[in-house]
Every structure is written in C-alpha cells, then in structure tokens.
Image (spheres, rainbow, N blue to C red):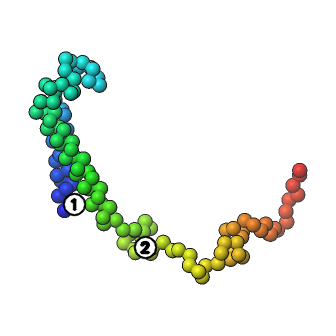
Amino acid sequence: MQTVVIVVHLLIVLTMIGLVLLQKSEGGGLGMGGGGGFMSTRGTANLLSRSTAYLAGAFFVTSLLLSWMAGVDRRPASIIAPGAPVSGPTVPGPSAPPLGSGSGGVLDQLQRPAAPSGPQVPQSQ
C-alpha cells in the first residue's frame, strides 16, 4: 500500500512541476508586474493555475498519508546490530538503590574526592 501511495505521490510531483513550467510568467519577481494579479478573475479562471492548485492539495494529502503510514509501523531498532531486538526502556523499580546511597554511581564518584594513585606534583598557589 505504501509503495502505491509513493508512486502516486511522485506522479503528482512530476505533473505539478510540468504545470508550473508551462505557466506564463507575469513579469518581474514576486508577482510584481503585468496587469492582473494572482487573485484576479482572469488569473483564477486559468486552467493551469487551477490544476496546479488541485495538484498542490493532492500533494499535501499524500504527504500527510505517507507520514502517517511511516509512523504506524515504526518500532525501535538497534543501530549497532540491525535486526536485533531492542528491549524497552528500563525504569528503576523498588530494587534500585536511591541516588547517593553508596551504590558506586556517578553521584558518589563526584561527591568523594578521588584518592591519589601515585606521587603528586606540588601545586603553587
């Protein structure tokens, strides 16, 4: 199903690119030029601009559909070993010792100074 939506999405994109390239330029950049603007009756009645608007709407809908379909089948995966199952997040239960209770965690290492492992060089102040 996802492959079909991707193919339809790509066909919409290619058709929309073609329609935009076929449209007549109105002069200067950002629509500043020519007699009628984008919202004039002549501009909205144009077949190419209406077709482009419909294709833009279809592009938006297929983009949302593809993102929803990608999110439905998303499962956590390991980056290191592809295909290996990943266990869910571990939440410390009642058996886990509280932080700072002498369990050898990072907080305990930060709270007590490290014992010198050998001769130390005197520091000048």
In the image, 60: left or right of 121?
left
Q: Position of residue 99 (x, y in %)?
A: 66, 72
Look at 18% across and 32% down and name the residue there: 21
Q: Is residue 95 above or below residue 75?
A: below
- Please indicate, yes or no, whether residue 76 appears anywhere in the rendered image: yes
Please give left or right for residue 114 compared with residue 80 in the image.
Answer: right
Residues packed near mark 2 inside 10 Å, few (<14), some (14 to 19) or many (20 plus): few
Residue most toward the bottom? 95
Closer-to-camera residue (14/39): 39
Specify few, some or many for label 1: CA neighbours under 10 Å numbering under 14, 14-19, or 20 or more: few
Secondary structure beneath dot 2 equals loop
Determine whether the residue tagged by mark 1 lies in a helix, strand or loop: helix
Tell me residue 25's x, y (percent): 20, 24
Q: Which residue is mark 2?
A: 86
Name which residue lies at 80% across and 69% down.
115
N-terminal of the pair, mark 1 or mark 2, is 1
Disc 1 versus disc 2: distance between alpha carbons?
25 Å
Occupied quadrant, residue 42? top left
Q: Amino acid at mark 2?
A: Val
Residue shown at 30% from the left, 64% from the top: 72
* Total marks in image: 2
The picture places residue 17, in percent across and down from the top left corner, at 19, 38
| Residue pointed to by mark 1 | 2
Q: Percent from the top left, x then y, of residue 120? A: 85, 62
Q: Quadrant of residue 123?
A: bottom right
Q: Are marks 1 and 2 in contact (CB under 8 Å)?
A: no
Is 105 situated left or right of 44 in this image?
right
